[in-house]
Amino acid sequence: MELQDLSTDVLIVGGGLAGANAAMGAAEKGARVIASDKGKIERSGDIGGGVDHFLAYLNDNEQWDTQDAFLQYVEKIGLGTGHLSILESVYCAELKDSIERMARIGNPLTQPDGTFYRTRSMGQPGTYWINFNGKKLKPCLGQAVRKLGCTVLDKVMMLDLLTHEGAVWGGLGFHIRTGDFYVIRAKATIIATGNTNRLYENPRINPFNTWLCPFDTGDGQVMAFKAGAALTNMEYMRMTLLPKGFAAPGFNALVGMGGRFLNSLGEYYMEKRHPMGNRAPRYDVVYHTLEELRSGRGPVYIDCRHLTEKDLAHLMDSLGYDKDTLPDYLEQRGEKLRERPVEIMVSEGMQAGPTEVTGSGVKIDRDSATSVPGLYACGDAADHNRCVHGAVTGGYRAGKSAAAYGLSMRHFPGTSRPGLREEIEHFMLPLHRPAGYPYRQIEDAIRKIMAEHVGALRTEGGIRRGLEKLSNLERHLDEIKANDLHELMRAHETRSLLQVGKMMGNAALFRTESRNKPYHHRLDYPETDHERWCGLVVLEKKGDGISCSFEPIKARGKG
Amino acid sequence: MPPVIDYTKCTGCGTCDSLCPADAIYMEESQEGDRPYLKYPEECWHCGSCRQDCPEGAIEIRFPPDMLCI
């Protein structure tokens, strides 16, 4: 194990879709870039294996296909969960260039004939989903990032940020195969670590069988919080609908093509329960599906039998774009979309944005800057980026802003870290304990507590009890034993999960209303109160604790 | 055991080991040289990256019974 001392203009923590776009944005502005990832950037993150959808308006003559109509849609499905002025800057202003950039790097959002294949779901006023084959998107991006001369640190897990007088100047991490320790001095740092996906008890048994990448464990959110950055929207526990048994995405494609939700009584329940039917916003579909299951009308299915041969053929072709192995799964399970409905289920909970257009995590402004000088955030780790479209646009925006900041700094804010050796030894401790608990044992307890106390139905008493249990469990974090570097990585992920859980619990307790049910559904405050709670719950570090405050969001046309 | 490696096709190039986002695939020594094996099968996310990028087409995805039968 060696100590690697590096310096750069911009350090990027997390090389998924957002981090890779951030690397491009920073490098194309002339900054020196180091991009780190626990995996290899060509295949890491939520869309490592592929993706099939990108949300966009294209200014293509239709009234709904404009920026103004898009922002109206954001307000309709996500009122109180994001500032439109920030979305205008980190998404709208970057959209056209981002679509062109994906084509430039070799994975266009168009079909082979050059047209966009567009579908509609989730409360959209028109066909905002661009359906495309994104199986090579990450390999193309990885190649583009390396071609720009960025230093890529694959298989490096960042553990903490370097801070000096309230500013961030880089980070610390280790190589999960060699054990080499990295001290990276950076004039600007970008958090791009995705959301938190292994945090709730998994209804499909295995905690790694998650909708979004199970290796996204909120590491960046926790580092940013510790460095003094504010976080928002942490109360929302996102869920979706998935094929029973396999947490593969595909919901967009199935519903977008016209799939209908069915219960075990043979009723198309969304068509009875919601004016928008199967194409209602995601949180409404999940809410009503949970209600069906709670009422004993499960199992639930998605029915695609009525689709035309042409639509079914497109669906079968494109299902594997979003999750490469989903067609294998359906085949091995004996499912046939054209012959019978496919059983689905509600996913595990996760720390992620309450809508497709508003996020959860590190609070950013119009420049993708956090509340801490030198620190930026993007992608699912940031509170105003969400999904594929948010990562591509917001990532690039964060890269440009961080480059401008970094290049304007003549010196590093800090130069040395007192007690660095001791700190490194502390990070490595789980490896050297003669005995201890496997990380999984602690993690399973976190997931159980989160599901039972900070889950889909919440009360003040329940959340308080959950927070108490997390605090009790926290005392055992220093008793985790890692047998190798792989387990050391997982042990640090376990630490992140517990901290994210505490943040979610605190935010959920603070917001005494319900919003975007079932993502934040307080049984003791079941109504949505736009008068008092239209805005963001802001979390900040206060001593060893968490402080909560409220930041209102004004509806459009109201000043 | 999601990725199943066909050792008659595998050349031991290490592509799957280097790109697996789960850090689940490692190389081991064998009589025929280094070859990959699935060290942490439970942590596989079934992303299919190993199969997509295997230059020899030596990887097949086989879902375990708990995922196929619940």
Image (cartoon, grey):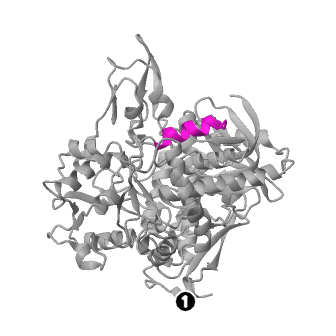
Q: Quadrant of the C terminus of chain A?
A: bottom right
Q: Return the residue nearer the eye: A497 or A229.
A: A229
Left or right of B18? Residue A268 is left
- Which residue appears at 51% of the width and 38% of the height? A42
Per the image, the residue denoted by label 1 is: A531
From the viewer's perspective, is residue B25 above or below residue B10? below
Tell me which amino acid carries mark 1: Glu
Instruction: Tell me: residue A552, above or below residue A493.
Output: below
Q: Residue at x 56, y 44 (%)?
A: A491
Q: Can you say which quadrant of the picture contains the N terminus of chain A?
A: top right
Q: Is residue A100 left or right of residue A179?
A: left
Residue span colored magenta: A137-152
Of all residues shown, which one is farthest toward the top? B31
The image quarter in which residue A488 lies: top right
Classify 10 Å Cα crowding around label 1: few (below 14), some (14-19), many (20 and above).
few
Q: Secondary structure at mark 1?
A: helix
Q: Nearer the viewer, residue A160 or A451?
A: A160
Dominant secondary structure, magenta = helix
Residue A438: horizontal and vertical position, in percent? 50, 42
- Which residue is depicted at the point 59% across and 69% down? A88
Give coordinates of residue A81: x percent, y percent. 54, 73
Q: Position of residue A87 (x, y in %)?
A: 58, 68
Please say whether residue A482 is visible from this viewpoint. no
Residue at figure coordinates x 43%, y 35% from the top left: B40
Q: Residue A160, position in %: x, y?
A: 69, 48
